[in-house]
Image (cartoon, rainbow, N blue to C red):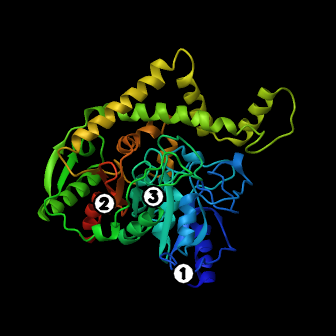
Amino acid sequence: MELQRVLKEAVGINDEFHFFNLIDTRAKAQGKGRLSEVVISVKDCICVKGLESTAGSAILKGYKPVFDATAVGKVRSEGALIIGKTSQDEFGFGSFNVNVGIGFQVPLNPYDRERACGGSSGGAAGFTAKAPFRHIALAESTGGSIVCPASFCGVIGLCPTYGRVSRYGLMDYANSLDKIGVMAKTMEDIALAMKIISGCDPKDPTSLDAPVPDYAALLKKPITGMKLGIISYGLGKGVDPEVSTAVKNTIKRLEDSGCTLVEIELPLVEKYALPCYYILAMAEASTNLAKYCGMRYGAQENIEGNFNEYFSKVRGNYLGEEAKRRIMLGTFARMAGFRDAYYLKAAKVRAKIIEEYKKAFEKADVLVSPAMPFVAPKFSEIKRLTPMQNYLADILTVGPNLAGLPHISVPVGKNKGGMPIGMMVIGNHLEEGNVMQLASCVVEK
């Protein structure tokens, strides 16, 4: 690998598309290993020792971790070249990667620079699509932040089971929902990366002590006899007809290859997953962001007045509009008098949603739907959206994230305007192998 050529090409691409918050021009190859010929980018909310890691927020400008996240340490030990930190919505708060922190640039879609990359891992997906060399992105998902940008940018993005990959070194958005995953152009690289970063970690009490399969071997396994659960509402009202057609055509090809199709109804997910997700995610976010007050963590100002005035000054000056909105809404959901009506009710609904998915997997091996109900929108269209319309973009992706299930977006074509369309495949708990097996067949076809 010619290091200087890689860095020069990355800088050139970034100048045009703004995929990175930081490129490490002093990056060095780490030696031999399974990733010694692979360039790795890391989402800005995942800690990399010695590199500014801000989660896309001005309030963390200048923060350089003194340790690697576990996932970063694992790829580093396999000889990967870690090139820099990719753009994201501030703390992951967004579906289009336009809610960047104060002073950060919005990444541009590699297929049309007037359109969004998707969020919140937009920089990771965009650079994966444009990189002229072998590249794997470490990304993160809370409610769809891997499959959404993967779909919009025409790459493969896998979000694993909650607990499959250590969260140690990940800056929290919502602890019970955050997951580190991967993006790449090929299923072989997805399988390799997942094999390396998966596994139990004593530094993360939520990581699962479960055997890690040989994902590469599963890619070659035939799909004959596999039961595909077609999520009915995923192909219904509100889905772009071109998206629906591309996914239906792919499903038909899979049926011709020996898969059995099963219609799956998920009424609770369809009706309640979105409000349930946003209540829980915002409540957890408001707690997690409380530490960024200008005392121990985050940007600081001259201390004047009482502490509440100081905290308000710091947060007012350094947090973006969407971050403030989610802190306020999350705090409201946890307040005395409202906690039972909102937060606890949402927690109960989440348990019901998990049960609904369990019943679905009694009928099917994997579930399929579009990853997103539309292709990447134009920035001019996004500006006209209300906050509620922004949140509705996640209607198809929040369900598997609430249930902690593995899911992947795989490209299944383009619309008439040349914009990529992604199909989402959802697996049962710890069944990333089934997800990759089917996705590999889709890629081949």
Which image quarter is the C terminus in?
Answer: bottom left
- Residue 437 placement (x, y as % from top left): 27, 63
Q: Which amino acid does label 1 sit on?
A: Lys
Residue wearing tag 2: 433
User: Which residue does the image show at 39% across and 57% down from the upper left?
Assistant: 151
Residue marked by disc 1? 32
- Residue at position x 76%, y 33% in the image: 311
Question: SS for tag 3?
Answer: loop
Disc 2 residue type?
Answer: Gly
The Cα atoms of the two marked residues, 1 and 3, are separated by: 22 Å
Instruction: Identify the residue at image location x=57%, y=70%.
Output: 76
Q: Which one is nearer the viewer's eye here, 349 or 370? A: 349
Which residue sits at x=45%, y=60%? 198
Quadrant hosting residue 5 = bottom right
Q: In which quarter of the image is the N terminus?
A: bottom right
Q: Is residue 233 left or right of residue 275?
A: left
Q: Mark 3 points at which residue?
A: 199
Q: Which of 257 and 366 is in front in this view?
A: 366
Image coordinates of residue 442 in percent, x first then y, are: 26, 65
Callout 3: 10 Å neighbours few (<14), some, many (20+)? some
Between 384 and 279, the one nearer to me in the picture: 279
Question: Which amino acid type is shown beneath numbered disc 3?
Answer: Gly
Depicted 57 relative to depicted 29: above or below = above
Give above or below for 247 relative to 288.
Answer: below
